[in-house]
Amino acid sequence: MKSPIFPKYPPALDDTQTSYLLTNIKDWSIAHGLAVRPQSAFISATVDPSGVLATTAPVTIFPSLFPRSCFEQGRSIQTAYNRLYSAIARDEDWLGSIVQELVGIDDFITKLWEVHMTVKQEGYTQSLTLGLFRSDYMVHVEELENSRNVGLKQVEFNTIASSFGGLSSKVSTLHRYLLRTGAYPANKDGSSFTESSIPQSQAIASLTRGLVAAHTAYGPSKSDKNLCIIFLVQEPERNVFDQRHLEYELLEAHGVRAFRLPFARVLEETHLNDDKTLLYTSPHASDIQWEVTTVYLRAGYSPDDYLSGTEWDARLHLERSRAIKCPSILTHLAGCKKVQQVLATPHSPHLERFALKDDIPRLLDTFAPIYPLDKSQAGLEARSLALNTERAQRLVLKPQREGGGNNVYRKAIPEFLKGIPESHWPAHILMEMIEPPPQDNIIIRNGELQRGGVICELGVYGVCLWESSTDEEPKGRVLENWEAGYLLRTKGDQSGEGGVAAGFGAVDSCCLVDV
Amino acid sequence: MKSPIFPKYPPALDDTQTSYLLTNIKDWSIAHGLAVRPQSAFISATVDPSGVLATTAPVTIFPSLFPRSCFEQGRSIQTAYNRLYSAIARDEDWLGSIVQELVGIDDFITKLWEVHMTVKQEGYTQSLTLGLFRSDYMVHVEELENSRNVGLKQVEFNTIASSFGGLSSKVSTLHRYLLRTGAYPANKDGSSFTESSIPQSQAIASLTRGLVAAHTAYGPSKSDKNLCIIFLVQEPERNVFDQRHLEYELLEAHGVRAFRLPFARVLEETHLNDDKTLLYTSPHASDIQWEVTTVYLRAGYSPDDYLSGTEWDARLHLERSRAIKCPSILTHLAGCKKVQQVLATPHSPHLERFALKDDIPRLLDTFAPIYPLDKSQAGLEARSLALNTERAQRLVLKPQREGGGNNVYRKAIPEFLKGIPESHWPAHILMEMIEPPPQDNIIIRNGELQRGGVICELGVYGVCLWESSTDEEPKGRVLENWEAGYLLRTKGDQSGEGGVAAGFGAVDSCCLVDV
């Protein structure tokens, strides 16, 4: 038997040590805004009708172990991913052909495409697009006869509403604080970790600089108003502090004003000038108009956000505006699972269309095999894998659209597929499960401790600002491109889904180890 | 009729404006640690057994108006007050005579004195004392025939556990943020205030520098251990974030480690070496001893903290240690109301004993007349005032000891005095009520809004580090002395008590106006 990848970790805690850590985490997190609004199952609206309470965000007590080489791999490849996805978003013809395959299968994708086509026919007024991306990975361990491969495999690439940048910066500061103050006991075997083992996520500062880059690139006001950025948000939003940290950084570090605009109020609170300039009026100050440079979508990414025609009208309204969209509809579409699938289907020709030659081997390295469920040769082969109970053990079935909560795991796959019409199968993709190295941790949720085996997902943020194609630059032009900090999300290894805000999983940071 | 002192204020709010302010205050406060643990009447332990929830600290929506001249008066006189009270704390004979007058009347004061005497007989091992003081004032308006005097009158001088330095820094940042982002509407009459109207309280940074000054002056370790500061605290503590902000600043800005030690656990977790060096062991890391340079008391200031002999043993244990006390017993005693009374009794000879000649007129200016209730000539005259229902309307009766919650106001005074034995009367002092100028504001508490007339109390923090008397310096020596930021506490003008943590009043900041 091979030696385990990770050292014995985390150190054992007695009751006093646990209580000391818990007290320190509870106090530090509220003092520094590592917080969420409580779930209604925890605190009902009857108890707190005005929603004034907050609670520590679900966090791990210890930073989880993460191979240093994988962490560096994820950070160093981010600019290549930014280039790749911005190139896809600029290739309307290719994206159109992908969307065609989903007509009649995924209404949401189809509707998004229609919004794009409407604006295209009118003529886009803004050639710049901002991407605040997050590429999510797990560590995959492949045991060979005399060696072992340890590397990152991509879970998904988020082109819209990439969340937890705010809290990720805070949680690495928390873990470094706990370490620095001796709140963690040494491992029994004498091994220990140091502050330099826990990289500080710079996501707040770095994502904010991305918004500022767009804000600046927008240029001077067209309407002689003050300029602002809009955060398009859901309401209510439990994860509000995550977003607010970016808003506060915009103001404090850059003097840039941002407003939170609930998706449902877009048509009431914004207005398009004849030249498509987007003007915003906050209801608290109805005599003041602002010109919007950038619309940062933290809503509108999932079909659940579109309850009526109004939200589609709102999305169209924003898309046709002169404001820089983060992201545009085409960029949103570039993040659909179908795109990830066609790139990662073994022997796919598509990657070469978008990626720099030098980037391709490194990108391929991070792809986990993904299969379509259509009637192509690859699709038919995938169907037989999915329906085979034993083989399905190593697979996950995902819908092609954004937003968590609908994945089907392992042995549940055959039954699930048999329960829906075969015509709906192509709306899903099939992925090889990534098999991360086992480790333990403790998650704090609403003050309760959950101990046991955990699975970690690394998210690397990326900022990319680009110009769409012009006559001189038929492939468009990337103006800004940088890696923008990281997030570790950790969940119990028994739960299927990893979304922290949804009540599963916790925000975490990396304790880097050489493996 | 004279014109009102203050302009019309605050601006009127419609429902949308109120809701916008409320949302912004709720989010900003949690993101920045302007928070308290909820009262059990709001959130019971059944709902949140592990105490993970927090709520916005009670704050005013607007910074309250405050005369600029009074604000400058309070700040500029603070170093004189620091000198005065450190001189009193170094004059053991004089303090002894004051305590003598309270024997049999105030058990708490008597007990504190006994602790001091015990340590004195053994011999004090530490000649340095740290004061983190707070001098509390109200604006007093005196209408004369052709003019008006507006000045500060001192409510009390706190020599122990001066609280809200942490939250005061945060609330001025909040109010400046709301102003900067246009969350406040303009006054209907066109007048407005600017960020420079709202002075930023520097209490976190400045009080922390005081603790660092003591920590440094302590010198190198006597026991070859790492050095630390102890925050002596109550448990549970709803106002924990106020204290934590100082602890975090100690670590982040100065690399100084502090531990929270509940008063009830002093004897378990600390130990005196033969040379009276104070050693601390945190229960979470029982194999590590720290040498304590400074004990910062945020507990032990009130008789309620001494439930058994154990707490008195603990106070003695700390007092006899080599650690610098913030404050020492003598300094604690210097803050008793009796001292304030004998200084402020009209024609008192005592001030000249302690204050610099140049400071005396400025100090006298801030004294509100205070009368003893003993059998001296002044005391007998005061008794007849206190028992006169009409005259009592302008008086407040206060116990001589620290800690709020026991003041008797105005017409309730005669009845109160008649209800207790006459022998207990000298345990109280009588003060002229200070009559502040009327103004309105809105207080947010647990998300609910309380509108109406308010009364403000300005607290000015002071740091003072001194050496007790030696043969060369019989009056001792002040080593550090500075003004250390401000607090405004605001309560509805119908409530008698102003303690924010006790559930009355709110933290506030000043909107300076020229009057």
Image (cartoon, coloured by chain):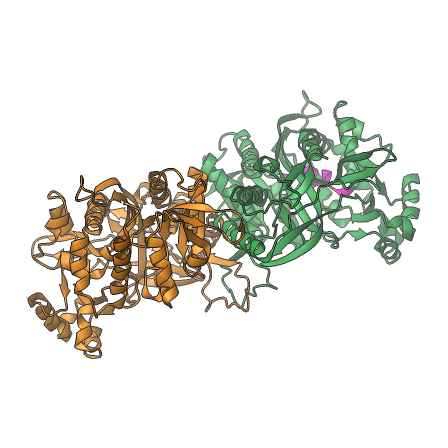
Chain colours: A orange, B green
The N terminus of chain A lies in which quarter of the figure? bottom left
Residue drawn at point x = 14 percent, y = 51 percent: A365
Residue drawn at point x = 82 percent, y = 40 percent: B2
The correct choice, above or below, for A447 with respect to A512 in the image is below
Left or right: where does residue B217 sit relative to residue B396?
A: left
Furthest residue in direction top, as rendered: B472
Residue drawn at point x = 67 percent, y = 40 percent: B459
Is residue B438 among what the camera can see? yes
Q: Which residues, given as a range, are shown in magenta?
A: B327-337
Q: Nearer the viewer, residue A320 or A27?
A: A320
Residue B238 among those drawn in magenta? no
Q: Nearer the viewer, residue B313 or A454?
A: A454
Furthest residue in direction bottom, as rendered: A419
- Where is residue A67? Give x, y as percent: 23, 49
Residue drawn at point x = 82 percent, y = 44 percent: B431
Residue B330 among those drawn in magenta? yes
Q: Is the magenta region chiefly helix, strand or loop?
A: helix
The correct choice, above or below, for A124 with respect to B251 in the image is below
Is residue B104 among what the camera can see? no
